[in-house]
């Protein structure tokens, strides 16, 4: 019984270590996203920033795609990104999404 308890204890410690490492990795990713987002927000106009905030609240996965595109755009130009540019990006992303339709017979 003592061996069994030791094995359980060892396994529990391993699982706790794995969980802690996973948490640290996730935190590093969130910190990196936060850092990128801060840089992007500095380059958005007020209207574009408001639109991005709305997108982030309503569609977080879309906001991540937009963030990636904004980073690429920031690398190419030093100008502020206005609401019209953000709207165009969203239109392009919307066109790329495929609509799934279900046909009933």
Image (cartoon, rainbow, N blue to C red):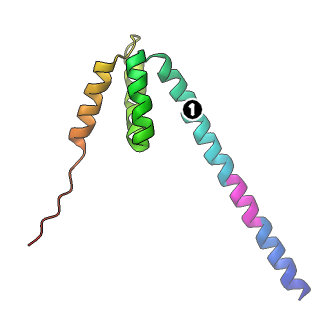
Q: Position of residue 51 (x, y in %)?
A: 38, 27
Residue 65 x/y as whole percent: 38, 37
Q: Nearer the viewer, residue 103 or 89?
A: 103
The percent position of residue 41, horizontal first and vertical second, equals 48, 22
| Of the pair 47 and 17, the residue shown nearer to us | 47
Quadrant including the C terminus: bottom left
Which portion, as a residue range, is magenta?
Answer: 14-21
Q: Which residue sits furthest bottom? A: 1
Q: Quadrant of the N terminus?
A: bottom right
Q: Is residue 13 magenta?
A: no
Give the side of residue 38 with respect to residue 68, left or right. right
Residue beneath label 1, please? 34
Q: Circle 1: is it few (<14), some (14-19), or many (20+) Cα within 10 Å?
A: few
Is 17 included in the stretch rendered in magenta? Answer: yes
In this orientation, which residue lies closer to the viewer: 77 or 94? 94
Residue at 45 percent across and 16 percent down: it is 43
Percent across and percent down for residue 52 are 41, 29
Rendered residue at 70%/53% (across/down): 21
Q: Secondary structure at mark 1?
A: helix
């Amino acid at each position: 019984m003592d061996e069994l308890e030791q094995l359980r204890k060892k396994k529990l410690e391993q699982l706790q270590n794995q969980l802690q490492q996973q948490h640290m990795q996730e935190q590093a990713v969130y910190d990196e996203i936060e850092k990128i987002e801060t840089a992007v927000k500095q380059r958005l106009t007020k209207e574009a920033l408001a639109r991005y905030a709305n997108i982030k609240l309503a569609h977080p996965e879309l906001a991540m795609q937009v963030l990636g595109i904004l980073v690429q755009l920031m690398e190419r130009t030093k100008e502020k990104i206005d609401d019209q540019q953000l709207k165009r990006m969203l239109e392009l992303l919307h066109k790329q999404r495929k609509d799934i339709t279900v046909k009933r017979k």
